[in-house]
Image: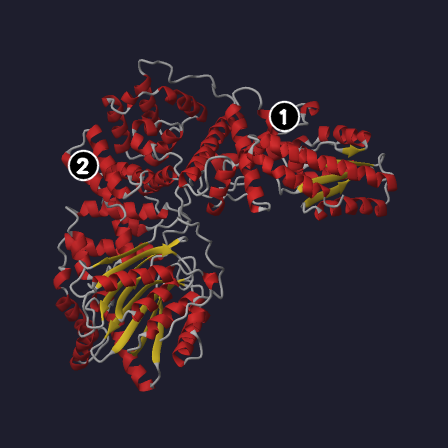
Amino acid sequence: MKLELKAKLLRTFPKAKTIGSGRLFTRQLSYLVDSSLISLYQNIDQEIPMMKHLALVPIGGYGRMELAPYSDIDLLYLHDGKLSNYDLTEIIARINTYLYNNEREVGHACRTIKESFLSMDNIQSYHAILDSRFLIGSKALYQDYKNQFLDKLPKDRIKEYNEWKLDFLKERIINSYNPLLLSEPNLKNDSLGLRDIQLMYWIEKTYTSPSQREGGVFDYFLNGDTLPIVTAYDFLLRSRTALHILSGRKNDRLDLNYQSEVAEFLGFGSKVELSSIEKFMSVLYKHQKDVYFYLGMYLEKKTSPSLDHYTRHFSNPDTFYDDIMHFFLECQLKEIEPSRIILNDLRFASHFIDDDFKNSGPVIDTFLQFVRNRKRVGHLLTLMHECNILGKLIPEFGACSNFPLFSYHHEYTVDEHTLLILRELDKLEEKVWEDPQVQAVFNDCQKIDILVLAILIHDAGKVKEGDHCQYGAELALIIAERFRFSEEDTELLRFLVAEHIIMSDLSSKRDIYDPKLIQSFSQMFTDANTLRLLYVMTIIDTKSVGKGVLTNWKKEILFFLFSATLKVLEKATNLIDSNERIEQTLEVYLQEKEGLEPEIAAKIVNFAAEIKPSSYLNYNTPRRVFQHFVNIVEWKNMQIPFRFISESEPAFITVTIFSEVNRQLLLFVSGTISSLGLNLVGMRLFRSENDIIIIQSQITDQFGSGAIAPEQIQNIEKMIADCVSGKVNIEEESLTEHIWSSPPKIPDGMVEELVKFSNDQSDSYSVLEIRVPDSIGLVYRILKTLLDFDLDVIFVRISTSADFAYDSFYIQTSTGQKLEDSEILFSLKEKILEVARMKQNQGIFEISF
């Protein structure tokens, strides 16, 4: 009997594939547990007579008969106080042990009827007891429990809990600023999951008569216009069941690693086909949207009972299209929050919108008026999208509805991400954005209506394979023609969509302190306003990818790129011919700020001018140049292998190392950073005329901040010193993360690998771009490969997301030339892909210096 229940459950699990109902399957699991517990209870009763004094009462999800494969089995041992403590303990131990031995988690309570009133102090316990049902034991005792407790729950406590639940749902769903459709949703506890529906069910259960309180969630929603929420609840139960079975544990987080497995399990297609996941997640999101609308109507009816729920605003077919657009325009102008019941009416009415809606002149004119009013545009466009109107007007955006992005750093679907950007734009319009620097740039922007449309379709191209920016630009031209834009506005819209990732790309992959890059970038813009719009779009787009993605580091480098380019556009300076000006500025600083004699200042200027590459003077301020000169002098006098200094910046730590030429030092730095669980986000190598190298590295913690403890900085210096002296094997350390856990395993095919060489950026160096799944020691292994090919590394830009690395390396041959030999390029590409595919658990990568 010990393993009987486990065997029964395991035999039943495969049935979840063919039973198309989560309700039926979870109920069957509940029946199996019921049967085993009844049999066990009867056996115990033969040894310890207890039928008159004890009732076994399932509660919680088990009480509702919605038992997921690995959910807890919650039991109430209801007794009348006449069993001895010894017998009661023995009974509970026997039943709980049986469940534990069958690998079931148990949550239990042991109470009398009188003691049950104490459970009302905890809302979780209160919810659990609302789902009480009789299983076996004393029926008379359970009937007393119903009459004396369940039917007499304190009305003031019920009211308090119900009001709390209504407020919770309203803040969580209706007033929520953040997107509700997540890339990796918790099927139980996240917004629009099972728990939100159960909260409504628990509220309604307290409003019914005592005789009607037994039953589950379905029993309370199988009446009226409730089919969508019943169907949604069933699908969520079914998806949760599949997730439990596939993970072999209690698991409600539908992360990327399991989505393909669940999709196949539920019959959406093979797990190796990306389309299977897309179909599954699209259906899931559709059901969650149904939950969203039902919740909105439910909350409005509960909190605004005087509202006329039967008003129909869109019943006149002759004015149907105009009524829709003027409804949102009126809400904007009068600052009215649309009724959720009316929005649901509009959602229903949207099914009767024809293709001529998107081409209607009056509809387009009203929409553009709405956008140009610049009041709560993002918020109202979100509501317009939720009731299926925005996608009818701009079908190019509508194609993105519920479209998942298979990436660990994208938390939301394409449409949710896009609308979140527009709600960030609302905050800029209201002048309440959290960064005054970004707010100030936005305040000078014009043509915000074009920016709104560019944001709407900037990621629309992702529904098609290939370059989504170029495809999006094609869609922009289609929309501009349909909206009858001028040539100027058409080009602005096309540009913002086509180039919406360029600032992010340049700041993460290129040396933005290179004056040639800034000059080249500035030539893309016809005016400063276009640059401002693109900068603002880049900032709020990056922020809306997910929480914590827009780090201080990213904001800082984006603003530098923006401000440096703006100076060129405004002709404040000519960066191409700026070295002489920078040298003059340095000399003035040294004499006036540092108080140096002219001959000493001239010596330092000469030192800086001779450092290669020449971007050294653009990248380092006069203060830092002086600091470097002093440190080099001190280092030479100290006669130590290298000099190590660190400086805290707003978004990162800058670590600078001065040394004689030592090609292994780059490996020591990258390997050390990797082993300590820190992020290397940038690295530059400069070389003086007398063969002194300066390595400048930017380091953040694993969360992208510069909050790195002094002890960790000391550990970096010590480990590099140990590497130089030979005490530490950097090969082993670079592949071992000592502090934080490894990043999640990336499903095969999630990242399209890229190794690309560009020789059009400079006359003296090549740019190597690499996009591969991230892993511990990746930068170390790539650097080692480059050095093995006898290449010099000038600059490294590290851009690592949660799921992939997108790194750039500026390289040249040992003779200072670009790398143009096709055979070497091919061999180098193959070797880089080989070392990039190494996994952490494949052992140490053998190298020899």
Quickly name the residue at label 2: 489
| Nearer-the-camera pick, 183 or 272 | 272
| Nearer-the-camera pick, 722 or 429 | 722
Between disc 1 and disc 2, whose residue precedes? Answer: 1
Q: Position of residue 647 (x, y in %)?
A: 35, 69
- In which quadrant of the rendered image does the N terminus lie? top right
For the point 24% across and 79% down, which residue is it?
691
Above-or-below relation of 433 to 817 = above
Residue 207 is labelled as: 1
- Secondary structure of residue under mark 1: helix
Q: Position of residue 355 (x, y in %)?
A: 29, 22
The answer, for residue 79, to whether it is visible in the render is no
Is residue 665 rendered to the left or right of residue 729? left
Q: Amino acid at mark 1?
A: Tyr
Q: Amino acid at mark 2?
A: Asp
- Secondary structure of residue under mark 2: helix
Callout in the foreground (1, 2): 2
- In which quadrant of the rendered image does the C terminus lie? bottom left
| Nearer-the-camera pick, 371 or 800 | 800
Above-or-below relation of 525 to 287 = below
Q: Position of residue 649 (x, y in %)?
A: 34, 64
On the image, which quarter does residue 74 sit in?
A: top right
On the image, which quarter does residue 754 sit in?
A: bottom left
For the point 37% across and 66% down, which residue is it?
780
Above-or-below relation of 23 to 587 = above
Disc 1 vs disc 2: Cβ atoms closer than 8 Å?
A: no
Q: Position of residue 778 (x, y in %)?
A: 38, 62
On the image, which quarter does residue 414 sit in?
A: top left
**How many residues crowd mark 1 within 10 Å: few (<14), some (14–19), many (20+)?**
few
| Nearer-the-camera pick, 393 or 300 | 393
Is residue 146 rendered to the left or right of residue 513? right
